[in-house]
Image (cartoon, rainbow, N blue to C red):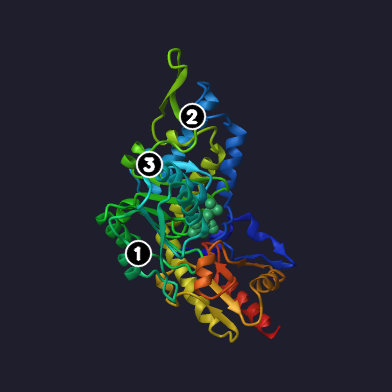
């Protein structure tokens, strides 16, 4: 088991006081805090070897390029991909999904084709498909969610058909923390010849994820939700699919050659190797370096330990929250089927009221609909309060959280 108190030593921000109270950070599903190792790695990059990558032959550029490539390799190992050719650095989950939509979907979807999307998706796995369908005219079909927030697998099996070209689902819901059986969905999808795009924004930071074991075609996730910096994220794609895809953005780095043909008066362009074919322009090099440090840190902690710690906290918080009379928790009550995300409401108070009250005691949670409005509609909610945990959270913090919620009930 991991020791959150030892881990906290590495997170400078956790020493802060907010409104004269020790900071309790329960907004980890939105973004996580950064350990010293990540902050130092970025600082060291800028202090010692800052240069552009893959462009110059001088020492600094060679060093920066090596670091940036190592970051791809480290991420590839972390999710059990075949190598850095399958790892494209992007800004985050949102950009990764848009990349698939526009680089793959724009050319492959039309007319009667269908894309299946679940109703528990973050807007970033809904909006790009709806936008693209307005251009290409294919169908976006939604797979429902049961009252406890779990995916309706029966509905999925009824919805999938030979027309389905892509199945888009989150591995873990950012509202309820429900872990979807991605392996089962991928197996069925592949039987129908459909590809599978998994939104791993809430799973890669919290679970041991193997793209080979899940047998998925694409996986999107964000560095900032797994101790890394903002502005860096990952699209994993199976090599053979990425090889066949055309690039998303055009510019420098993603080309092998651009030559002007004096007869046609046009430029002929050939693409660079993977993954650079999908990384046009100067990339977020320091972000990649920071992400590599985050991945190394998580590997040291051990992803099994991360999962076990969060499960213990989730079990504990749900037990303690039963003491509260006016608080309602949404989603499944069994901590083993979910990650450490607790959506809740308090009778008579808006989610923003709850969040502001908690903030006055130094406790940071999220309020609103968490970019997942369709799921809130399913729960008949306009919004919810959400507490989400990570490796540095403790039982003591949960005790304090429940204590303050008791005060909110009085209020
Ligand atoms: C499940 C899920 N998907 C996608 C996103 C979007 O991530 P980003 O804003 O880093 O692109 C989030 C962020 O909250 C998320 O929780």
Q: CA distance from mark 1 to mark 3?
A: 23 Å
Q: CA distance from mark 2 to mark 3?
A: 17 Å
Assign a secondary structure to mark 1: loop
Q: Residue furthest right?
A: 20
Residue 116 to residue 158: above or below: above
**Residue at image point 47% right, 74% down:** 331
Quadrant occupied by the C terminus: bottom right
- Respond yes or no on whether mark 1 lies under 8 Å from ligand 1: no
Can you identify the residue that label 3 sits on? 86
In the picture, the disc for residue 181 is 1
Image quarter in which the N terminus is found: bottom left
Q: In the figure, is residue 142 to the left or right of 391? A: left
- Residue 26, given in percent of the width and then of the height, sits at 59, 66
Report the residue marked by disc 2: 253
**Nearer to the camera, 129 or 234:** 129
| Mark identifier at residue 1 | none
| Residue 101 can be seen, yes or no | yes
Image-based side of 321 in relation to 300, left or right: right
N-term-proximal mark, 2 vs 3: 3
Residue at 34% from the left image edge and 37% from the top image edge:
244
Question: Considering only order in the chain, which callout, 3 or 1, is on the residue closer to the N terminus?
Answer: 3
Callout 1–callout 3 Cβ contact below 8 Å: no
């Amino acid at each position: 088991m991991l020791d959150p108190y030892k881990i906290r030593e590495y997170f400078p921000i956790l020493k802060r006081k907010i409104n004269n109270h020790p900071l309790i950070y329960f907004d980890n599903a939105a973004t996580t805090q950064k350990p010293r190792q990540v902050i130092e790695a970025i600082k060291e990059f800028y202090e010692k070897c800052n240069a552009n990558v893959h462009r110059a032959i001088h020492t600094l550029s060679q060093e920066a390029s090596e670091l940036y490539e190592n970051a791809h390799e480290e991420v590839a190992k972390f999710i059990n991909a075949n190598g850095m050719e399958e790892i494209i650095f992007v800004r985050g989950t949102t950009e990764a999904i848009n990349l698939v939509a526009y680089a793959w979907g724009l050319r492959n979807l039309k007319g009667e084709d269908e894309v299946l999307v679940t109703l528990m998706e973050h807007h970033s796995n809904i909006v790009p498909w709806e936008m693209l369908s307005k251009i290409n005219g294919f169908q976006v079909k939604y797979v429902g969610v049961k009252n406890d927030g779990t995916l309706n697998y029966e509905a999925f099996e009824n919805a999938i058909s030979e027309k389905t070209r892509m199945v888009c689902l989150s591995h873990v819901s950012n509202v309820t923390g429900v872990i979807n059986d991605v392996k089962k969905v991928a197996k069925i999808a592949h039987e129908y010849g459909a590809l599978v795009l998994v939104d791993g924004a809430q799973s890669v930071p919290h679970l041991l994820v193997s793209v080979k074991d899940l047998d998925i075609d694409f996986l999107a996730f964000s560095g900032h939700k797994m101790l890394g910096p903002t502005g860096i994220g990952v699209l994993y794609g199976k090599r053979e699919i990425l090889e066949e895809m055309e690039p998303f953005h055009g510019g420098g780095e993603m080309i092998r050659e651009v030559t002007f043909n004096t007869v046609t008066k046009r430029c002929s362009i050939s693409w660079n190797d993977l993954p650079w074919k999908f990384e046009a322009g100067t990339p977020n090099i320091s972000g990649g370096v920071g992400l590599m440090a985050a991945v190394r840190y998580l590997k040291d902690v051990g992803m099994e330990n991360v999962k076990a710690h969060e499960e213990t906290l989730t079990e504990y918080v749900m037990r303690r929250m039963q003491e509260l009379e006016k608080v309602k928790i949404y989603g499944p009550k069994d901590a083993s089927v979910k990650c450490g995300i607790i959506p809740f409401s308090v009778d008579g108070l808006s989610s923003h009221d709850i969040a502001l009250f908690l903030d006055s005691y130094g406790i940071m949670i999220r309020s609103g609909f968490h970019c997942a409005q369709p799921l809130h509609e399913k729960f008949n909610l306009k919004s919810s309060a959400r507490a989400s945990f990570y490796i540095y959270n403790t039982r003591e913090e949960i005790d304090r959280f429940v204590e303050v919620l008791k005060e909110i009930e009085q209020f």
